[in-house]
Amino acid sequence: MRWSRTLLNTLRDDPQEAEINSHKLMVRAGLIRKVAGGLYTFLPLGMRALHKVTRIVREEMDRAGAQEILMPALQPAELWERSGRLAAMGPGMFRLKDRAERLMALGPTHEEVVTSLLAGEVSSYRQLPCTVYQVQTKFRDEIRPRFGLMRAKEFLMKDAYSFDTSMEAADRSYQAMYDAYTRIFRRCGLRVKPVEADTGDIGGNWSHEFMVLADSGEDGIVDCAACGYAANQERAERMGTPAAEAVCPPLSEVPTPGVRTIEELTSFFACAPDRFIKTLIYLADGKPVAVLVPGDRDVNEHKLKRFLNVKKIELAEEEILIRVTGAPVGFAGPVGLSIPVYADRSLEGAGDRITGANRADTHFQQVSLARDARVTAFEDLTVVGAGDRCPRCGKPLQLRRGIEVGHVFKLGTKYTEAFDAVYLNEKGQSGRMVMGCYGIGVTRTLQAVIEQCHDADGIVWPASVAPFAVSLLLLDPRDEQVCGVVAQLEAELEACGIDVFVDDREERPGVKFKDADLIGCPVRVVAGAKGLAKGGVEIRLRTGKESEIVPVGQAAAVIADRVRALTSALDAKTDEPAVRGAGNE
RNA sequence: CGGAGCGUAGCGCAGCCUGGUAGCGCGUUUGGUUCGGGACCAAAAGGUCGAGGGUUCAACUCCCUCCGCUCCGACCA
């Protein structure tokens, strides 16, 4: 392909709307252009890279035994009513009506469609296990689209769904996808970390996210260097350290006019924030509950929601708080509350603490939770952070940030129940299919590659997903000899199946070098009159500083060799053992 | 949805406070000199200053409304 015939403009300046490097580079290198917030056009170079990623995804899905299908993006709302998710998805789902006023949805995901499909197609255990997948556009009305392709309203996703006859068989399907994901990301040149994750609205009981470690990531990840435990912060647990303060003088009341926040309390009482018990009033599916955590801790609402097994958790409005506690904001406490009280496990046995007194401008001190309050249950309810103890081995955890590029779920029978997806076993008995679902954000993966693979000069593509394997710089486009060499080399490389991008523009060499660095193809070949006089063309890797001069006659073979070496370094080695800890514990 | 910031040529920006009808750099076109790490000279094209309304003799500039974009937050008592 020739630059002069390609819709490609590189930009010298960072685009004003871009915040993170990968987004800036995608725009500057001419891979994408913004249409509106969260909506992007892929230009030819971006499209090529995207195709490379989807090709790897397809190859690994096929290798894992999944079958490609294609489901509609536009779906009847009744499917969503049937699973109960029409309400659960809320305004996150794009809704519209057809001319017959029938409510439709632009699919944010496809559990409903696929389960309904399999319920109709599969009736015998002989047809199972069955895993299907598709690569398709998803629509989500994101509250805040961000960072280019990282969080867009329309994006490309690979979603796969497995159906099995038993939990054990479903575990095997899950493991197969988990292993396939590991290979996919490795072949894309990404370093990913699988972490235990919250299942969120999708439902189910077990899931892993595949995280690309990056400071710009939207998710917090905690992991343990000692034992390998790793989890999304939303789900992460910590080893409890129950308080053991036996002696506690009697409860006493302290006037604290206007002292509401932990910060104010800390200076008022002149003691550490963990001396306080923070009492928050939540509405769990509309019913008020009190949640107690140490003053220096935050409540993890994901954990709370899962523990209480409710659909919705929200902090109570001031009005409700006053009704429940009898005090304005800042003076809630566990003593004498008539609603359920849930306390973080670290508060078990807590004595000599300070809490609100459920009366304006008043706190209690010398509170013993066991003696002075009725706690319904103790549970791990706080957000885990750096320095907390690993729930498995007790060593300190570290906190990092990550980009979620893939997510695998064990769904169980949530959807197969809703859609009555059953089969007959060898004894003629009816059984319910057990399901798993598996997603890869393809467009997000592409951007994550750039976020992880770039330097000050531009993108440093892994060979497997680069728009072109080779940049061929034609330095003297008016020199017939050089043009001839380039044309010949281009043809030879294409004959070997190596994609070449020829910069044949009427530009000065410096411009071409800068653009080649920006676009970041793994192998750069320079053909110019000076080089030819010195004996050939110059070959240099995007990652290297050294160039080699190769005679024209041998150039194609040498370049092909370099490209192969780069690609096979990334290619999955199928005999490599699967990554452990895939959720079978 | 709440808070903050920004909308001026294809891109990046100045001008606005203190009103007088728009400028810089990059890019583009033409000509010339250059030619191995974002060249130089000369000329040129390109803007209803986000939209609408108001104030004024006069609005990019002041006021109001709306729209769009970006960032922070979505909650810590």
Image (cartoon, rainbow, N blue to C red):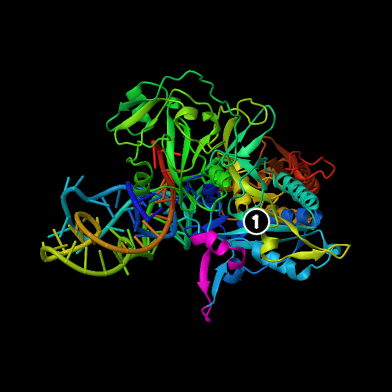
Q: Residue at x 77, y 47 (%)?
A: A175
In the rendered image, residue A464, in percent from the top left (x then y), is placed at: 72, 49
Q: Is residue A503 visible?
A: no
Q: Residue at x 80, y 49 (%)?
A: A168
Lateral position of residue A456 relative to residue A36, left or right? right
Residue range of the region highlighted in magenta in the rendering: A81-101
For this orientation, the residue located farthest to the right is A426
Q: Is residue A113 magenta?
A: no
Lateral position of residue B65 relative to residue A498, left or right? left
Q: What's the chain of the residue with tag 1?
A: A
| Above or below A542: residue A96 | below
Look at the numbered disc 1 and give the secondary structure of its residue: helix
Q: Is residue A377 visible?
A: yes
In the rendered image, residue A491, in percent from the top left (x then y), is placed at: 76, 58
Indicate the quadrant containing the N terminus of chain A: top left, top right, bottom left or bottom right. Answer: bottom right
Lateral position of residue A11 relative to residue A177, left or right? left
In the rendered image, residue A346, in percent from the top left (x then y), is placed at: 54, 29
Q: Quadrant of residue A65?
A: bottom right
For this orientation, the residue located farthest to the bottom is A100
In front here: A378 or B67?
A378
- Determine which residue is flagged by label 1: A50
Lateral position of residue A292 relative to residue A242, left or right? left
Q: Quadrant of residue A357?
A: top left
Q: Residue at x 77, y 49 (%)?
A: A171
In the rendered image, residue A389, in percent from the top left (x then y), is placed at: 60, 27
Q: Badge 1 local density, few (<14 within 10 Å), some, or many (20+)?
A: many
